[in-house]
Amino acid sequence: MQYLRGAIDCHTHVCPHINGRSINVFEATRQAADAGMRAIGLMDNFGNSSGLAALAMAELGSLGVEVFGGIIMQPIAGGVTVEAARTALAYGYGPGTGARFVSLPTHHTRNVAEREGRSPAYIETTFSVPQSGKVPDVVLKIMDLVAEADAVFDCGHVAGHEAVALVEEGKRRGLERLRTQAARYTEDEIKAVVAAGAYAEFSFFILTHATQVSLTHVDKEKHRSKGMTIDEMAPKIRAATPKRAIVSSDAGVFLLPPPVEAFREYMLLLESAGFSEEEIRTMNSTNPGELFRIRAAPVQSV
């Protein structure tokens, strides 16, 4: 499919997991190469995926797909600590193979824990930005490390108002590469985060039947993620504008097709929602390429 030629899926879940996966890292890389894609990003709620990405590049780099990873600072991966971030940024097989992104927690945020109906005791242990908007000191130190490494700082699954505070503080501290998962934000919050300099990411998972099933995401508890239609998502993408939006599959769970196929289906949904080919390519190739420092696509000979 033409939309996948040179595309970048910066959000796949093909690393080992306590849920079933549809595919492993090597298979995902080969399938991306077969589709003519430029890069894939590995997300992992249990550890730093930059090591697996470096391994995939060492074994399959000749296929022409750049595989990159990073850390989601869940408790099991070291938590929101300076040491976890510092280690991730250097973790791989030599220079240039460390984490390409450092993310705040996904499921271990107050925002997600409250949505999942977790216990008050659990919620008290989760990450949040206070209502005052003052970013915790440890996050400021992590931001400085990420800025120095020229990596991406990801807001994780925080609430919209928290993302605004994080992005604004990040820009003040010199962060040039910021990403936030924006599908559940209001349009005003989306406009605020992109105005402050972040890319707003919108993933396919939330549009799929996988949201109808209770899944084990990070521990033994099973929870559903409230779904959304493309008609509900499209105005949010428009609020970000295609120039500041990124689209990704967020696929790899056994209930969905492998990421390449899931990504293809998403592109067709975007097309059906009225996005032009130029807009889709901006969101699935240009923007993630600039954000994650992916090498330019080769010029196609005529």
Image: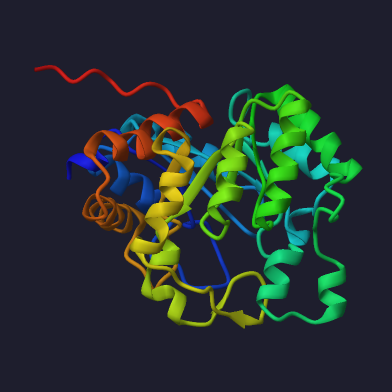
Q: Could you say which is closer to the camera, residue 145 or residue 25?
A: 145
**Percent x, y of residue 205:** 43, 63
**Percent x, y of residue 43:** 55, 51
State which quarter of the image contains the N terminus: top left
**Percent x, y of residue 129:** 81, 53
Q: Could you say which is closer to the camera, residue 164 or residue 85?
A: 164
Residue 115 vs residue 22: left or right?
right
Residue 265 vs residue 117: left or right?
left
For the rendered model, the colour scheme is rainbow
Q: Quadrant of residue 59?
A: top left
For image coordinates 58% across by 56% down, the residue present is: 185
Q: Could you say which is closer to the camera, residue 275 or residue 37?
A: 275
Q: Residue furthest right?
A: 137
Q: Could you say which is closer to the camera, residue 84 or residue 233?
A: 233
**Percent x, y of residue 91:** 68, 36
For image coordinates 29% across by 33% down, the residue present is: 6
For image coordinates 55% across by 52% down, the residue present is: 182
State which quarter of the image contains the C terminus: top left
For image coordinates 23% across by 50% down, the residue present is: 271
Residue 146 in view: yes
Q: How many marks?
A: 0
Residue 157 vs residue 295: left or right?
right
Residue 50 in view: no
Q: Residue furthest front?
A: 188
Q: Quadrant of residue 2?
A: top left
Residue 16 vs residue 29: left or right?
right
